[in-house]
Image (cartoon, rainbow, N blue to C red):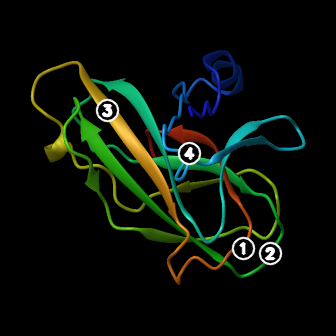
Amino acid sequence: MNIILAPKSYVDAQTFNKFSIYGFNPDTESAPEQVSNINGIPAASFKAGEDRELLMETDWAQRIDIPISLEYYMDSEQSAQKISLQIAYSFDGSTFVWMNAENIDAPSDKAIHTTTFANPIPVSAIPTGDGHTLRIKIRRVGSSKTDTHSGGFCLTAVKYYRAA
């Protein structure tokens, strides 16, 4: 089962700074569900209480730390809750390196928000030379006791820079 998060034409129409995102996960047990919000914006919904992940791939040639920002919305309104998220990265088909899970304060509305992981992918992890393939896995660690939001975390975009 492949999950398509957003087609290139949709992403390009939204902003000049987003990468085209094709998210996938062939494992139906751990894949998020394809949804869209009331405005028709496509998203991958990571259900509460479950560990779900999505894989994205892009070309990478820069020699700098790579901050990862997520654009998302919650599918239910709840206040004072947290979401536990984790990213992993891989260059050129190497083994994925999982970074520490981070807890974010979930918004109490269903609007689209942006968050940036505190720790970027370090420049030291990028292989020497040019023209690499960067693969990113995004995981909601719903099984974590720190993940307290009972609604779906709906990922709409992944950005390879620090969002303001």
Residue closest to the far top: 9
**Depicted 50 relative to depicted 73: above or below:** below
Q: CA distance from mark 3 to mark 1?
A: 32 Å
In terms of secondary structure, where does tag 1 sit? loop
Q: How packed is label 4: few (under 14 Cα within 10 Å), some, or many (20 or more)?
A: few
The residue where tag 2 is placed is: 78
Picture residue at 38% right of the left edge, 42% below the top: 136
Tell me the element at label 2: loop
C-alpha distance separating marks 2 and 3? 35 Å
The Cα atoms of the two marked residues, 1 and 4, are separated by 21 Å
Decide if residue 11 is in sight here.
Answer: yes
Q: Secondary structure at mark 4?
A: loop
Question: Looking at the picture, how far across and down is residue 138, in whole percent?
Answer: 47, 50
Instruction: Say which mark, if any, is on residue 134.
Output: 3
Which residue is disc 4 drawn over? 28
Quarter residue 18 falls in? top right
Q: Mark 4 or 2, which is nearer the eye?
A: 4
> In the image as oriented, which residue stretches furthest toward the right?
38
